[in-house]
Amino acid sequence: MNILVCIKQVPDTKIIKVNPKTNTLDRSSAPAILNPYDAHAVQEAVRLRGEHGGKVIVLSMGPPTARMAIRKCVEIGADEGYLISDRRFAGADTLATSYALYKAIEKLQKQEGIDLVLCGKHAIDGDTGQTGPGIARRLEIPPITNVIKVDEINTESGEMKVRRKIENGYEVIKTTIPSLLTVEKEMNEVAYSPMPNMMRAARYEPTVWTVDDLDDVDIKQLGLKGSPTIVGRMWPPEKSSGAEMIEGTTKEQVDRLLSVTLEKRELFGVKGGGKA
Amino acid sequence: MNIEEYKDVWVFIEQQEGQIIDVGLELLGAGRELADKLEVNLCGVLLGNQVKDSASELYAYGADIVYVIDDPILEQYRTETYMKAVGDLVRKYKPEIFVYGATSNGKDLASAVATEVMTGLTADTTMLDVNLEKRLFEASRPAFGGNIMATILCKKHRPQMATVRPKVMKKPEPEQGRTGKIIEESISLKEEDLRTKVLEIVRDTQKAVNLEDADVIVAAGKGIKDEKGFAMVKELADVLNASVGASRDLVEAGLCGHDHQVGQTGLTVTPKIYFAIGISGAVQHVVGMQNSDMIIAINNDPDATIFNASHYGIVADAFEIVPMLTEEFRKALKGVEVEGVTSDV
Ligand SMILES: Cc1cc2nc3c(=O)[nH]c(=O)nc-3n(C[C@H](O)[C@H](O)[C@H](O)COP(=O)(O)OP(=O)(O)OC[C@H]3O[C@@H](n4cnc5c(N)ncnc54)[C@H](O)[C@@H]3O)c2cc1C
Ligand SMILES: Nc1ncnc2c1ncn2[C@@H]1O[C@H](COP(=O)(O)O)[C@@H](O)[C@H]1O
């Protein structure tokens, strides 16, 4: 069973800084990492390969530096990596991204055969989670989002059973092979990479494709041109008038805080706002 | 695409086991304002099995028209069936704006429909407006990395779509006696042709944390550093009979589960009192709690942005002030202890 995992290199959003003058992101301030959810997706693919055989192939769209994220996937255990990289892909929103990835998957499908596609639940830079369902729609395979567990894969009947997280619980869903799953963190723990993987990853060079390497591409659907959404305006969020600062010694602060909150002492009766 | 043909504001009305959930009603409230500005109809889209009777409830919340598809095949949410049904409605009736709750199913559906009808979709928005001059939908959201809001536009494609998190918009007061009309459509899919099936839904009714309904939330951030600091905060919450919230960084540090996380990628909460202890006040956190009635921030950095979003601010070392607060509250609330209630955060 060959599994394709879409992976993205993202700036570590915990560290990235905003330039207060221009309101733009200073990308150089943050190191680039493999999107954490995608690491879980690769880990799951490696586990499924252990049970069902086949290959784990990772695919990314991004600048040449995204090779590093692909190497990270090889460390986790991926067999092969493909990077589609071209100025004509740049500036893509989720609709244009899913189109480009779909075109690459179509080519890999012909070349290698793909039985399952995995994506992360979302990428931490944009947090949209829209790319996976978009790819599935284009490939005309079922998307199952927010998957926390693959319960069963039956390659003979071509069916699988997975658990999908919903607001207050989960659903058990039966779907067909191939399907596209988007992966939650609860899926697994990303294991420590074994030494041979690390050594292989250090020297690994992914296959890099440009737009010209893909078949029958409609250039108008790529990159900025193919993106229906655009950023209109950026602004710092409105600052409210700000807090009344409670000054003084710690003791004085505590006393004042008690007096403002104890006006509402009935609130502290029962947890959860219910009635006693 | 002739964008002039597209009118009306649509809201996807999500239901669970036939019950309409709040987020759709909240969005009818927000959608009403947009529809009034544009002078068009506000329409709900309600799909399910035996849901037709609920459609009329939506008029009171502002809907002029409710598109209903009532079919056993739609009993449970499935991307394949819902995407097809909604895609057909969009192609036939051509809405100008279409918003969905950013729930698991709402996000899944909106993403699939966006590709199905080839249009733009903005995720997790917190503010909706229209630019009348250009007749454009302005969907705004916190943009990544910090203290920036961005307005996303979709100029050349219709419908203009967005997802909005539950609780961000206010559910309107129902206006009794308001009426509207139902337009019923059918779906032509057969169960045998479908590739997916929901076998079982397991609801975790014993959910330990119920932040969305809590009156008082004591939330902690990275400033409380470790297990010991978190235990200190939990003790305060215990004394106040409060629920415990957290910033994403605290969740990522492994100190508590994601179901405690408040913010853009966690829960939106609106308690009567929200304590923010050792939380810096990143916009992604603030959007999840800014509508609380009283926000009290404790931070040792006088310049922390959390103070901008708070009603009361205390510059202090959490490790010093929190234990004192706990003690004083314990004394002051002795008489308030309610019988038979044990706290178990
Ligand atoms: C796409 C995206 C989505 C996100 N979604 C969310 C979300 O849903 N929820 C969320 O919370 N975050 C979210 N974030 C992360 C957010 O940007 C911040 O990184 C995060 O909220 C910061 O957490 P924090 O305030 O706990 O940590 P920090 O920013 O590290 O702040 C710690 C604070 O503690 C104070 N402090 C330190 N020591 C003490 C002490 N002894 N006493 C008192 N105060 C002390 C410090 O002054 C500081 O202000 C998201 C980020 C991105 C990019
Ligand atoms: N440029 C990209 N290259 C490869 N995969 C991507 C890319 N963008 C998004 N994805 C995949 O889609 C998932 C969701 O991303 P997003 O829709 O941006 O939140 C990610 O976790 C990846 O699996």
Image (tube, rainbow, N blue to C red):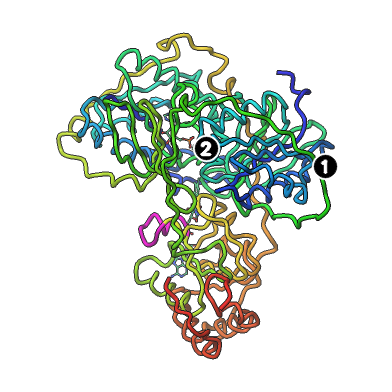
User: Would residue B111 be found to the left or right of residue A119 on screen?
Assistant: right
**Per the image, is B252 magenta?**
yes
**Residue denoted by label 1:** B36
Label ID, residue A141? none
- Residue A203: where, in percent of width, then height? 22, 27
Residue at mark 2: chain = B
User: Would residue A245 be found to the left or right of residue B2 on screen?
Assistant: left
Report the front residue among B115 and A211. B115
Q: Quadrant of the N terminus of chain B?
A: top right
Magenta residues (range): B247-257
- Residue A92: where, in percent of width, then height? 53, 26
Residue A266, visible in the rendered structure: yes
**Residue denoted by label 2:** B108
Q: Residue at 28% across / 38% down in the picture?
A: A43
| Residue type at numbered disc 1 | Asp
Q: Residue at 47% across / 9% down in the picture?
A: A216
**Per the image, is A40 magenta?**
no
